[in-house]
Image (tube, rainbow, N blue to C red):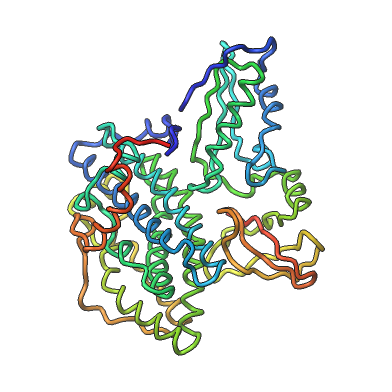
Amino acid sequence: MSETDLMDKPEAANAPALDAKTQAAFVDYLLHLGDNGLILGQRLGEWCGHGPVLEEDIAMTNIALDLIGQARMLLTRAGEVEGAGRDEDALAYGRDARAFRNLLLVEQPNGDFAATMVRQFLFSAWCYELFRRLTASTDPGLAAIAAKAVKEAAYHRRHSGEWLIRLGDGTAESKRRAQDALDDLWIFTDEMFEAQPGDAALAAAGLIPEPESLRPDWEAMVERVLTEATLTRPDPGFRREGGRTGRHSEYLGHMLSELQFLQRAYPGARW
Amino acid sequence: MVTLAATSPPANPPATPDAVRALLEAVTDPEIPVLTIGDLGILRDVQVDDAGGVTVVITPTYTGCPAMSAIDLAIRERLLAAGCETVRVKTVLSPAWTTDWMSAEGRRKLEAYGIAPPAEGAGEGRGALFAADPTVRCPHCGSEETEKVSEFGSTACKALYRCRACAEPFDYFKCI
């Protein structure tokens, strides 16, 4: 990756002083955001050359590019706040699955096109609400990244939301596939609003919003799209979480073996 | 940030920010070569210190824009060739780039090149789900009878459109 710093140093220098415990929680949170982008970007990249039509192949890889761009900045910021000398590459390529903090939702396999669009919509609707609030973070570095990312998330939400409506309110087959994907992935959505023990201190410091506070706006948008799509909202019940504490599904390790192969085999290799 | 030094500078390196900006008129977006970085609004600031060291501040259009490193390199090459001894290129994220920063000249050049410029006055609705699409004029025949084919086009900043009047496909530089 580039040798140029993506973060403007003076902005980062204005960050509030944090005690060691809050700082560690903030690093973990930044890794959570960065890993979401990195892992979903990698998943979408798997569609390259396999999209159902050329336009969608291009769309999914464009979204992947945005997500990886966001991940680079977020991981860079995580490394800066941590202050241990780890850069974006060290964090992306040098951590094991248990150290990844992404949502379980984003590591789920692509499935068919409907499943990829459902996953994208559930995630992007959340990301939009999250980044919108993070533009007011007391960490100037995170606020600057969020101000860029929210504009991109708006387009991702729109693209996947429109597809969900088209698939749900389409043919019997497209509706069945969209509903199946929704039923399968719904169990991972509660995790987006689940607070970790460190989050309260981060929210009190104005660094992040309370995770639960995003739920009403997310629910309203999801409800609106599902109604338009004539899809049925799955019953709440069984739920899965654990991504933010490193308890991932089996899928993540397999993804990392591909994503990290080159740096594991040839540590420090550069283009 | 990477600092490069020229080996044999010509006699008259640019001494003022305006002189540097004039040189940077030659630096274009590698994916839209008719637009300079000034036209695009990604050139944010130019500083020249007492020792003649130049700092150029740029901002990315999209977080993952792969053109940024090529633009960074082109800026260095241009200024080092003009005799600057020290060139720093700094990338800033805040304030976030918006298509509103594209110059009138840039918009005109974009349309002449065959890419529809970003719609003006799209406001807060840009990219929003359930918001109406802006009216996009075909850069080939001028008709406003156009339709969106895909929200994502050949680069992160463009959408793919089709003209219903002349039937030509074209890129639209979408608003962010």
The residue depicted at 61 percent of the width and 17 percent of the height is B84
Residue A217 visible from this viewpoint: no
**Which quadrant would residue A180 be assigned to in this image?**
bottom left
The single residue placed furthest to the front in the displayed view is: A265
- Please tell me which residue lies in front, A44 or B36: A44
The residue depicted at 18 percent of the width and 58 percent of the height is A247
Q: Residue B95, relative to residue A159: is it above or below?
A: above
The single residue placed furthest to the bottom in the displayed view is: A172
The residue depicted at 61 percent of the width and 20 percent of the height is B80
Image coordinates of residue A105 in percent, x first then y, are 30, 65
- Please tell me which residue lies in front, A41 or A265: A265
Q: Residue A204, relative to residue A159: is it above or below?
A: above
The residue depicted at 53 percent of the width and 61 percent of the height is A58
Picture quarter with the C terminus of chain A: top left
**Is residue A184 left or right of A52 when viewed as pictured?**
left
The single residue placed furthest to the right in the displayed view is: B141
**Is residue B142 left or right of B72 when viewed as pictured?**
right
Image coordinates of residue A124 in percent, x first then y, are 42, 63
Residue B147 visible from this viewpoint: yes
Image coordinates of residue A75 in percent, x first then y, are 34, 43
**Which quadrant would residue A269 be assigned to in this image?**
top left
Image coordinates of residue A33 in percent, x first then y, are 33, 52
**Is residue A188 left or right of B141 when viewed as pictured?**
left
How many numbered circles does the render carry? 0
Picture quarter with the N terminus of chain A: top left
**Is residue A89 left or right of B157 when viewed as pictured?**
left
